Image: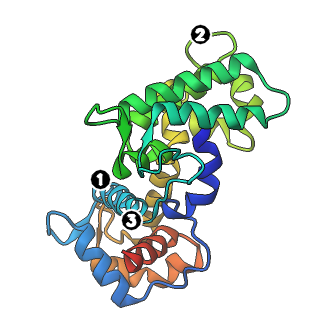
Amino acid sequence: MVHRRLLTASARLVMSETADLGHVTEEDLRKLFGVIDEDNDGKVTLGELKSFNTQTARRHAEKFFKLPAWMDEDEDGKLSFEEVKEANHKIGMSTHNIDPEGIKKEHKKEEVKFQEVDADNDGVLSQSELVLFFHPNLDTKASAVEAAHLMDTLDKDEDGVLSESEFQAKSGPVDFQRVDTNGDGKIQLAELEQMSSGALDFAESMRRMTDIADQNGDGSVTLEELLAAREALAKKGEDRYLRSWQSMRNEL
């Protein structure tokens, strides 16, 4: 419950849809390519792009995330689970049409997620751990907790998967077929996690970018291919991650 209030305010730290980023120059692309290409083989793969995206977003979030003073009651810059529970209580008291069962599940989810990101098991979250608690898409364990909670919330018949009607009831405009990647007519937990963590959107965006830039069709992109496709990517809006990465790197 707590993290939902903060994600709106701090999403710009890790989301790639940052506004007014401008265009990516050739010099920007050369610099980005050099750090994305981890094995220095002259081409970047989807795996390298994914790794770079996570690392950059995480570093940026760790640098700029600030714990709200109203949550940090003892002003130590850390967050205990007691402080999480107290914050949840304050938010719950100001919420209309309270669903007791829903709040109970939300609290349990927050407790499990707290335990997952508390890497040193000291009962409090440090700055780096706080980032993962409030930005669970940056950590596989925290992301899995969020996805399991979402499944539990939407799966009304409790069969462990989501039908199209269950999914559409609360998911908004997200296309069911897009999330149902194996095409079996149901959304599995792994598929739901891909959607909720942003991994599905990222993978689709990278595939579109690769389709435009990959001139020889080998499934990877060289610097020369990326430079040649720069204007086409910008025209189609498929350079948004490139622009976001450059913007975040400029602030690090």
243 vs 4, nearest the viewer: 4
Q: Quadrant of the N terminus?
A: top right
| Amino acid marked by disc 1 | Gly
| Amino acid marked by disc 2 | Asp
Would you call the spot at circle 2 few (<14 residues within 10 Å), some (14-19), or many (20 or more)?
A: few
In this picture, is 201 found above or below 92? Answer: below
Q: Position of residue 105 (x, y in %)?
A: 61, 20
The mark lying in front, picked from 3 and 1, is 3
Q: Earlier in the sequence, mark 3 or mark 1?
A: 1
Secondary structure under the numbered disc 2 in the rendered image: loop
Name the residue at the front extreme.
74
Per the rendering, the mark at residue 123 is none
Left or right: 108 in relation to 97: left
Residue highlighted by disc 3 = 63
User: Residue 177 occupies which quadrant of the picture?
Assistant: top right
Residue drawn at (48%, 39%) of the image: 194
Secondary structure under the numbered disc 3 in the rendered image: helix
57 vs 219, nearest the viewer: 57
Q: Quadrant of the C terminus?
A: bottom left
Residue highlighted by disc 1 = 47
Residue highlighted by disc 2 = 159
Quick check: marks 2 and 3 in contact, CB under 8 Å? no
Q: Position of residue 50 (x, y in %)?
A: 35, 55
Q: Earlier in the sequence, mark 1 or mark 2?
A: 1
